[in-house]
Image (cartoon, grey):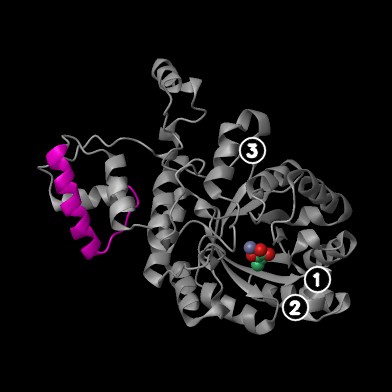
Amino acid sequence: MSRKVYIFDTTLRDGEQSPGVNLNIQEKLEIAQQLARLGVDIIEAGFPIASPGDFEAVRAIARNVKGPVIAALARISPGDIDRAWEAVKDAEQPRIHTFIATSEIHMRYKLRMTREQVLEAAVNGVKHAKKYTSDVEFSPEDGFRSDLDFLCQVVEAAIEAGATTINIPDTVGYATPDEFGKFIAEIRARVPNIDKAVLSVHCHNDLGLAVANSLAALVNGAQQVECAVNGIGERAGNTALEEVVMALYTRKAYYGFETNIKTEEIYRTSKLVSSLTGMPIQPNKAIVGRNAFAHESGIHQDGVLKERTTYEIMNPAMIGLVQNNIVLGKHSGRHAFKKRLEELGFRLTEAELDKAFIRFKNLADRKKEITDKDLEAIVEDEIRII
Ligand code: KIV
Ligand code: ZN
């Protein structure tokens, strides 16, 4: 029997913490609507105390996006939690996600708090959030670098105080798969009330291991994965949603996990996030990179033409990468051009669209049929030059 994995998307919170990314409310709402279509279970819409703009964006998402749980992040202090609740309270299913660091290094240098103070603050914070909603997530920040005994003590107390999800972050991306898997198994074994909460993981990609660490955690008893579209996030980013989901999907016979994700929406979601954040996708990026399904060598091309699965472990159609039947050519108008770009996940300003349309017409004079790849090249190489 397959086991359900909850997909918690933090594109709009941790993802927006990527250097240089700054989404406005309308853009966040558009991404959140697409995440709902993609089928994520939880959208972390933002960090309301961080700025009035973030507060408004979380509130707009909570009021307008139906389907997923909508979460708002808060430090453990009552003021943060009150603000988070104010922003998220109108959601169909609101969640408060509150955190405090538990590693020695964070407690000593950043928080300047003792273990006892951190434990007390965690319990009080969860209880405070619980007055507002039954759905409270607690994260011991820098969990992986925390003393395991102390971490388990805090986790147990947070569950006792009412936390319904416990999220273990590898905040600085220090873990490797083998040890992170064992770490999660230890937490499961040592915390007596762990079954009363959903056990989640939140991996950063500083060593390029976020997806591998998340998979190792799932095998060892985690039930929720926190991730971001295109793997964006602080520093080297977060677990890439499309990679962890397609790993679970493609290797279902091996892992036996399933998600609610409509994989056909992955490509469009990836393009939309890249387009609105201005963060390019590297060509060889797994799943959504331009080369992910391209075959260059003659031997590979020959193999794929004879039988696709010789060199393709996934059908590109499964992530929504399909050629459109409507062929764009030199007779196509601006409206059809704009519509196709939107279907591909690109949102251009009117000025960018004008520029792109001229390039398109020039290309259409030289080439009979303009493919989706041509359109992507026009936007990514010539218009956005990112
Ligand atoms: O990386 C981290 O520890 C976080 C927490 C707020 C969950 O983003
Ligand atoms: Zn993070």
Task: Provide the secondary structure element on which disc 2 rests.
Answer: helix
Amino acid found under the numbered disc labelled 1: Ile
Label 2 environment density (alpha carbons within 10 Å; few <14, some 14–19, many ≥20): few
Kind of residue at disc 2:
Lys
Of the numbered discs 1 and 2, the one sitting upstream in the chain is 1
| Most distant residue in the top direction | 306
Q: CA distance from mark 3 to mark 1?
A: 35 Å
Give residue 294's position: percent from left, percent from top. 41, 33
Which residue position holds label 3?
Answer: 257
Q: Quadrant of the C terminus?
A: bottom left
> How would you rate the neighbour count of disc 3 (Cα within 10 Å): few for under 14, some for 14-19, many for 20 or more?
many
Q: Residues within 10 Å of mark 1 (few under 14, many from 20)?
A: some
Q: Amino acid at mark 3?
A: Phe
In this rendering, is residue 263 above or below 234? Answer: above
Q: Earlier in the sequence, mark 3 or mark 2?
A: 2
Q: Is mark 2 within 8 Å of ligand 1?
A: no
In the picture of the structure, the residue carrying the numbered disc 1 is 105
Residue at 50% from the left image edge and 67% from the top image edge: 91
Tags 3 and 1 touching, CB below 8 Å: no
Q: Which residues are magenta?
A: 344-366
Q: Residue furthest left?
A: 331
SS at badge 3: strand
Foreground residue among 202 and 356:
356
Residue denoted by label 2: 110
Residue 364 magenta-highlighted:
yes
Question: Dividing the image into four equal quarters, which quarter contains ligand 2?
Answer: bottom right
Is 14 drawn above or below residue 322 in the view shown? below
Task: Please report the residue visible at 48 percent of the width from the left and 82 percent of the height from the top.
Answer: 52
Apparent side of residue 138 relative to residue 104 in the rendered image (left or right):
left
Residue 287 is covered by the magenta coloring:
no
